[in-house]
Image (cartoon, rainbow, N blue to C red):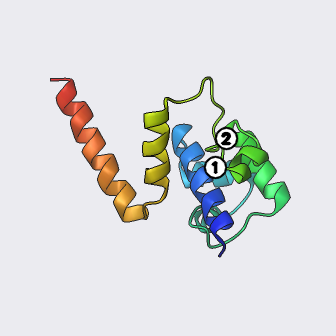
Amino acid sequence: MSQIGENVGLRIREAREAKGLTQAALAESVALAVETISRMERGRQSPRLDHLAAVARVLGTTAGRLVDGDGGLPREEALPREISRVVNALRGLDDTGQRRIRKIVELALERGDE
């Protein structure tokens, strides 16, 4: 699969998780199989345009944002440059690396509440 397909899949997953949806809930909302959503998110299958539009609608974004690298999420304001650099670096990590960073951040946030 192409880098574009992988990036689209990553943006779909980020937008889905930001909405608090499971793959199953998203799949049901757009009348697709859960495995189809999974393959799209992993970059193993490029979504058809009609499917991409339906997914974007459910996720509260546009197909263009999912494709063009705008993070897949509408922005109220631009992120500070330092945070943008971190986000871009995180996008380059594989799933294992992203999970490790997520755990580190979650632990730091929990300790911040103490």
At 60% from the left edge and 23% from the top edge, which residue is drawn?
Answer: 77
Q: Report x, y in % for residue 59.
A: 67, 41
The residue furthest front is: 81
Q: Report x, y in % for residue 33.
A: 67, 64
Q: Report x, y in % for residue 88.
A: 50, 49
The residue that label 1 is drawn on is 26
Q: Report x, y in % for residue 49.
A: 83, 58
Q: Quadrant of residue 5?
A: bottom right
Q: Do labels 2 and 1 touch, CB within 8 Å? A: yes
**Observer able to see residue 36:** no
Q: Nearer the viewer, residue 75 or 27?
A: 75
Q: Quadrant of residue 94?
A: bottom left
At 81% from the left edge and 63% from the top edge, which residue is drawn?
Answer: 48
Q: Secondary structure at mark 1?
A: helix
Q: In which quadrant will I find the N terminus?
A: bottom right
Q: Nearer the viewer, residue 48 or 23?
A: 48
At 26% from the left edge and 32% from the top edge, which residue is drawn?
Answer: 109
Q: Rounded to the nearest whole Å, what is the CA distance between mark 2 and mark 1?
A: 8 Å
The residue furthest bottom is: 1
- Disc ID at residue 59: 2
Q: Is residue 70 above or below residue 40?
A: above
Q: In which quadrant will I find the C terminus?
A: top left
Nearest to N terminus: mark 2 or mark 1: 1
Q: Is residue 62 above or below residue 92?
A: above
At 61% from the left edge and 59% from the top edge, which residue is drawn?
Answer: 7
Q: Amino acid at mark 2?
A: Leu
